[in-house]
Amino acid sequence: MDKLDAYSRKPMSRPLLAWTVAFFLFFGRAIDPCEAAKSEPAPALKVSQVTDLGVLGSPPKIHSRDGGYSVWLDDRSVWVFGDTLFNGKINQDPDFHSNSWSWTQDRDASDGIGPFAQSYDPDGRPSVLLPFTDEELAFNNAHGGDNCDLPPCGVRWALWPGAVVADPARKRMLFFYEKIYIEPGDLKFTVFGKSLVAWENAEQAPERVRFNPGHGHPTLMFPRGDFGFGDAAVVMGPSLYVYGCNLQGNQLPCRVARVELGHALETRSWETWTDGGQWCKDLNKGQQIFNGNEILSVSYNPYLDRFLAVYSQPMSTSVMFRTALRPEGPWSSPVEAFKARAPANKIGWVYDALEHPEYAQDNGRVVYITYSRQTSASAFEIRLVSIRIERID
């Protein structure tokens, strides 16, 4: 077993990043009790029924994972996950990827979702979704473990998945991700940027695009220092709307950008919504449209005839809804959809609630949401919840 495998036997890391975000949100500023009332319209829905449908199933050898963005393309629902522990072939010990994916042909979520299929490497281990570049892999191998060949020891790169959307006209999916630099110890993370890949075969890992050849991180579409997008995405007609909720100071402001779906890989084709109520090519001039979380979903809900945003309230077990008539808003004040089951750890909140609009029923009156909760020091479960909503006119 190489040094990277040996180092990767550490517990999942994304919850600690969520803890970092929540720490700054809570301790970095005074809470303004009037903040939610600032010129935000009322939400266009209320919740009438919440049903916990239990734990989402996993393919063989998957021990636990978090995240879980999904999209339907052709004959299957494709899911992308973050930190993933699995039982490897060698001594059946747990092993680790910072990302993975599965798919299912189940169209009805009312009795749960699954079974899930999974791609496996020749050694029997589940395949990684986003492979490291040669440079990233060499770095992780050189610095992995407590007694590495090249100090600092124990540092590594991780690739965490973001939103995924279908592009059936081009027979592909578009998949966002972020590149994270992780150091040993708690709360030591640096986001180096976000990016996008075109995924043409759900049974094979996508190839990462080099947007900036010669740059220190050539695969990043939105390098560190720029406002990145990819935390949520929704397609409307020919346009792709993409949201980014980057931690800035002590807040998580969400902004939105758009691009024609067929030109999504061309940075020059993107534009963002600004304070002046216009779309602008300078992506760093985007307007904050609401406070959310770094993991969220946005979909068009036919029953509401509005867009629906779903996210976990930071430092809470509350899962929140917001609504808007247009992707750029104005977005409503938040309404609590339900309280998730508290994790069995010291953190005590959830961070990755996501809607799966391909499973919505009754024209969107019933929606399905997942979230992960920690059940032990190195184990997670993903729970599935159905929500029945009522429109408020």
Image: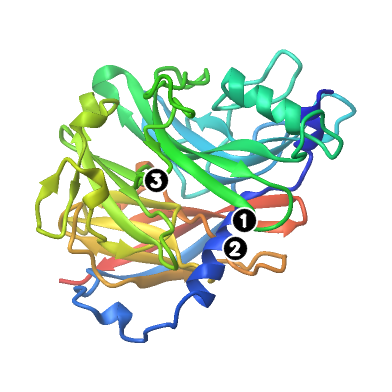
Circles 2, 1 touching at the beta carbon (< 8 Å):
yes
Amino acid on which the number 3 mark rests in the picture: Gly
Q: Is residue 190 left or right of residue 280?
A: right
Image: 319 above or below 265: below
Q: In this view, does 174 lie to the left or right of 315?
A: left
Res. 262 image quadrant: top left
Residue labelled with disc 3 = 225
Q: Considering only order in the chain, which callout, 3 or 1, is on the residue closer to the N terminus?
A: 1
Circles 1, 3 touching at the beta carbon (< 8 Å):
no
Image: 379 above or below 36: above
Residue labelled with disc 1 = 15
**Local crowd at mark 1 within 10 Å, few (<14), some, or many (≥20)?**
many
**Local crowd at mark 2 within 10 Å, few (<14), some, or many (≥20)?**
many
Amino acid on which the number 2 mark rests in the picture: Trp
Q: Is mark 1 on a helix, strand or loop?
A: helix
Res. 54 image quadrant: bottom right
Query: What percent of the width, then of the height, locates residue 367?
Result: 37, 54
Res. 108 image quadrant: top left
